[in-house]
Amino acid sequence: MPVIHHISAMRTALQSYRGQQRIALVATMGNLHEGHLELVTLAKQHADIVIVSIFVNPTQFGEGEDFDSYPRTLDSDVAKLTTVNADYVFAPSIDEMYPVLPPPTTVLAGSIAKQLCGQSRPGHFDGVGTVVSKLFNIIQPDLAVFGQKDYQQLAIIKQLVRDLSYQIEIIGAPIVRADDGLALSSRNQYLTNTERQIAPVLHQELQRLAQQLATGKLSQQRIEASLVETHLRLTDAGFRVDYLEIKTDQLDSIIDAKDFDIADKRLIILVAAWLGRARLLDNEFFTINESF
Ligand code: PAF
């Protein structure tokens, strides 16, 4: 499978397909796992040609974050992508992507980027928006697939496509989990063996909370009490909770909604929690029967 490092070569390679075949982009930072391969498989179902970008994007890492230590495993990534029939890998250098770093022209992801992960990672989603926007301009795909584990990222990319008028269909792919329920993530490899045993508790607690809230009349008080309880249970298990929140699927707050009728609406519980060196993300959808 061709591995292309330069923007001009990538554009040339794609020229003959344009207008004839559907092109899909799967954007990654490499260190690929089964979850990424599922994104490619899904992309293949919707497109003829799938380009996987592999680029550890410096502009989305904050100071003191794991940019330097983020695993770079291009050869094994390419081998894995061959097994799912990806067509091209686009693996540019930092200089190729950012002739000037930090880039003077960037995307601002707006208020949706200030909540949840944005609270502890200021500027992160501006960096994601900037690099995704560049990848969209380079590849000019008909569609792009992103994982729902990074639900806020997916919402921001949909907003980006709408606001900057990209003609690109965005497909959200279901979370891929290990047998014990842990959502797959490149950062799971930061877990020690002991932490890896504890890690599935994160998803178990989300499921428990979802079940608890799905039945009976939902009040603001009940939501808050359940969130406090789950927070405590996670802390007891060894997690340091960054956030644990319940939102509508548009990421609007339901606590502020008060008399907003959320019965039969899809709600999402979102969590970020540290376990040792790993910051784990997860989310769980649920529907409630009776609201406020
Ligand atoms: O989800 C990721 O791996 C990254 O945020 C992305 C979308 C590849 C942008 O660098």
Image (cartoon, grey):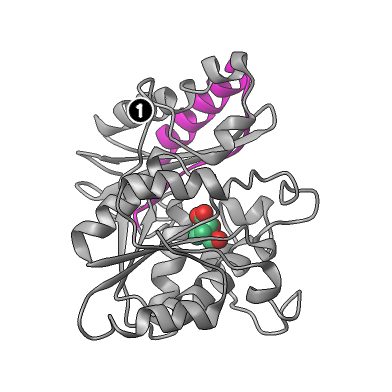
Quarter-of-image position of residue 98: bottom right
Total marks placed: 1
Relative to 196, is 253 above or below? below
Relative to 52, is 229 above or below? above
Does residue 45 appear to the left or right of 30 in the view shown?
A: left
> In which quadrant of the rendered image does the C terminus lie?
top left
Residues packed near mark 1 inside 10 Å, few (<14), some (14 to 19) or many (20 plus): some
Magenta residues, dominant SS class: helix
Residues 38 and 276: in front is 38
Whether residue 57 is in magenta: the answer is no
Residue 194 percent location from the top left of the image:
61, 13
Relative to 137, is 53 above or below? above
Whether residue 222 is in magenta: the answer is yes
Which kind of residue does numbered mark 1 sit on? Gln
Residue stretch in magenta: 220-249
Instruction: Name the residue located 62 percent from the left edge and 67 percent from the top edge.
Output: 127
The residue under label 1 is 207
